[in-house]
Amino acid sequence: MKADLDRYAHAVFGGVLSFGGADLSRAGSSVLMRHLGPLQTHRPNVRLIQEGDVLDKPRLIRSGWACRIKMLRDGRRQILNYYLPGDVVGFSTEANQTAPAACVSLTRLMTMDLSGVRKLLMDRPQEFPDLTAACRRMRMQEEHYLLSQITRIGRQKAYERIAHLLLEFHARLKRTGLSEGESFQLPLTQEALADGLGLSAVHVNRTFKLLKRKNLIRLERGSVLLLDPDLLAELASYREPGEPAETRDSAALSPVYAQSARA
Amino acid sequence: MKADLDRYAHAVFGGVLSFGGADLSRAGSSVLMRHLGPLQTHRPNVRLIQEGDVLDKPRLIRSGWACRIKMLRDGRRQILNYYLPGDVVGFSTEANQTAPAACVSLTRLMTMDLSGVRKLLMDRPQEFPDLTAACRRMRMQEEHYLLSQITRIGRQKAYERIAHLLLEFHARLKRTGLSEGESFQLPLTQEALADGLGLSAVHVNRTFKLLKRKNLIRLERGSVLLLDPDLLAELASYREPGEPAETRDSAALSPVYAQSARA
DNA sequence: CGAAGGCTTGATTCAGATCAATTCTTGTGG
DNA sequence: CCACAAGAATTGATCTGAATCAAGCCTTCG
């Protein structure tokens, strides 16, 4: 049991707190281990963090999915980002920082308290350089996902959004060892996807149908199989984090200004 | 001229690096002053930072507007966030951090190099606690704006998006002293707004017309007057940063789970 | 003055929302 | 093990907000 936990924590943290395949060292991982709190279970659709809460109780997600949300007055819901197993919610190494948005579980969830790790990193960060670096990569990751989210919902079609998000999920799960080849478990309802994608649940359903008809994906009992990841990536303009953009410099700007005179 | 610059820098930095009205101290501000690089001018629609660039050349915007963008293969453009006078672009206190997105000028721009300040904060942060704190608030701000952006384009109607964004601009300019009562200069083309709002330029134009017809705003020669900020805020679900959400807890979740059994 | 970019407006189309059933799953208690 | 209740998923019909296409019309500004 202890050994099992150990292996798991290393895998998860190596994947999630690392960026671009760089793993947490064995040492860092075991430091982590010694400061993990007990496992805790949460029901689906429960608020883990309220908007405005002080971020002093970070939690590592061991299993299940969560997200951050913003509500509009009339009940419309926007999911800002998703948290997958291995992700950390409510984390900040700054004192008194508050949550800019609420965090809720989307499925049944198992989490572990990370307050101990947080304390370590706040009190003597220089003693844990690789944990500190991992935190930094984690923050960069999160910003990357937020920017992707904006691009998806701002400028992409329904089928592009879905393809793009599925590719993101696949890549993230792969890094924590939770995918099997080109398939993975997707425990979200179509409504939860819709609220992240800026679409209606009905349209998510229809777009799934379209992607299935085109032989791009297969869906069965909560699992997704990407039948043609390259084509999907192509049609969703998907890029792995770190993968450089094609530099069509002129296209980025109004054509007129591609050359032009002084300011 | 020197005195003028001094005053300006204090005002701008006090506003922008501070959060919720807390100003940079006179001391911090003057430290800053002594480490500002020379003024530099940039034409409109010029790339200041490429995606992937190392973030070692932060710049303070003295005048003009900029933004971060993501391009899709076919030329669609999504503006991720806007930078206003007083904002800082390309800033990171971490070594070797790279830009997750390109940054371009939207108007003619005047900026000042902040590499000196960055060096200070990386080498001896503890000597400049209020600058360090200001950086933290700046990061929080930026995340707040990204989350607002997601909510706007994900779940709001065109008129809500525009109202919301105008209110955000007004609040941000007010903090740097660049608004006059309920009016402010908006030097963006409707296309630049459209690319941030996930709309077409034509529809932005029509929605402006609608808001004018409803006597909610007035537009003239690049300036915006908010005729009824409270009503605008109401209909756009706009909240000032820090203002708590109404806690309609049940509405945030599927109705069914408002009470319910064990996990 | 002239040209270019930006703004405005009309006409038309279309992607996606909404409304309304129906069916499929899944978990539950008897 | 079965019946059933509650969500989910699916599908059809219809509506609509916003995109697109296409002109004109203002403003700058060199």
Image (cartoon, coloured by chain):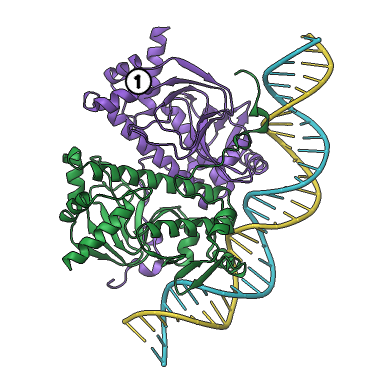
Chain colours: A purple, B green, C cyan, D yellow
* Residue that appears at 38% across and 26% down: A15
Query: Which quarter of the figure is the N terminus of chain A placed in?
Result: top left
Query: Disc 1 residue type?
Result: Gly
Residue A239 in percent (x, y) is at 42, 43
Work out whether residue A263 or residue B181 is closer to the camera in this orientation and state it: B181
Q: Is residue A240 above or below residue D14?
A: above
Work out whether residue B19 or residue B190 is closer to the camera in this orientation and state it: B19
Residue B235 in percent (x, y) is at 59, 55
Q: How many marks?
A: 1
Q: Is residue A251 left or right of residue A214?
A: left
Toward which corner of the image does residue A247 lie, by quadrant? Answer: bottom left
Instruction: Please say whether residue A24 is visible from this viewpoint.
Output: no
Q: Residues within 10 Å of mark 1 (few under 14, many from 20)?
A: some
As helix, strand or loop, the secondary structure at mark 1 comes to: helix
Q: Is residue B51 left or right of residue D22?
A: left
Residue B116 in percent (x, y) is at 17, 50
Instruction: Please say whether residue B41 is visible from this viewpoint.
Output: yes
* Residue that appears at 31% across and 29% down: A134
Work out whether residue B245 or residue A107 is closer to the camera in this orientation and state it: B245
Q: Is residue D26 above or below residue A171?
A: below
Q: Chain of mark 1?
A: A
Residue A164 in percent (x, y) is at 50, 41
What residue sits right under mark 1 in the picture?
Answer: A116
